[in-house]
């Protein structure tokens, strides 16, 4: 069964007139990195691919919470996962990640 969808392209409105620097689409979710370093996601959150603290699908762009000092520069989505690269080379991963290879969940602080 078809769920949602758009027949025609439409502009996505981000909060505070954010400007997109990078975008990626997964199986049923989309993530963007803005020039400000903030990350927004929307769509299916069945595997926490938008953020574990949300627990529901998001129909509007919703900010992913990172530790305060982190600024994202790139994003890539898997079918049920999301990964972000920060300006200083850290990788954050969340969603249906089979093996933890050292990435961090966005809502957790990095150990000092």
Image (tube, grey):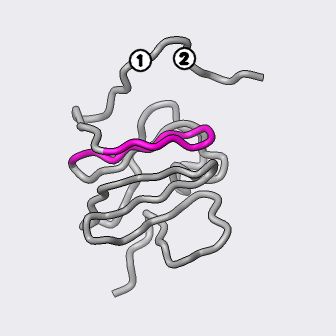
Residue 98 on image: x %, y %: 67, 67
Q: Residue at x 64, y 59 (%)?
A: 96
Q: Residue furthest top?
A: 8
Closer-to-camera residue (24/104): 24
Residue 34 on image: x %, y %: 28, 45
Magenta-span inclusion, residue 30: yes
4 to 85, vertically: above or below: above
110 to 73, vertically: above or below: below
Magenta-span inclusion, residue 61: no
Tell me the CA gap for discs 1 and 2.
8 Å
Q: Residue furthest bottom?
A: 112
Q: How many marks?
A: 2
Horizontal placement of 64 versus 45: left or right?
A: left
Q: Could you tell me which secondary element the residue under label 1 belongs to?
A: loop
Closer-to-camera residue (41/85): 85
Residue behind mark 2: 6
Quadrant position of residue 95: bottom right
Q: Could you tell me which secondary element the residue under label 2 belongs to?
A: loop
Horizontal placement of 54 versus 2: left or right?
A: left
24 to 99, vertically: above or below: above
Main SS, magenta region, reads strand
Q: Quadrant of the N terminus?
A: top right
Residue behind mark 1: 10
Q: Which residues are magenta?
A: 22-35
Residue 62 on image: x %, y %: 42, 41
Q: Mark 1 near mark 2, Cβ–Cβ under 8 Å?
A: yes
């Amino acid at each position: 069964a078809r769920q949602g969808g758009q027949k025609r392209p439409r502009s996505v409105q981000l909060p505070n007139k954010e400007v997109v620097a990078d975008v990626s689409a997964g199986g049923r979710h989309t993530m963007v990195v803005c020039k400000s370093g903030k990350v927004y996601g929307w769509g299916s959150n069945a595997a926490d691919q938008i953020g574990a603290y949300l627990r529901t699908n998001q129909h509007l762009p919703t900010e992913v919470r990172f530790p305060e000092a982190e600024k994202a520069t790139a994003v890539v989505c898997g079918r049920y996962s999301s990964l972000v690269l920060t300006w200083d080379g850290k990788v954050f991963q969340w969603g249906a990640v089979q093996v933890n290879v050292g990435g961090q969940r966005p809502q957790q602080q990095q150990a000092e």
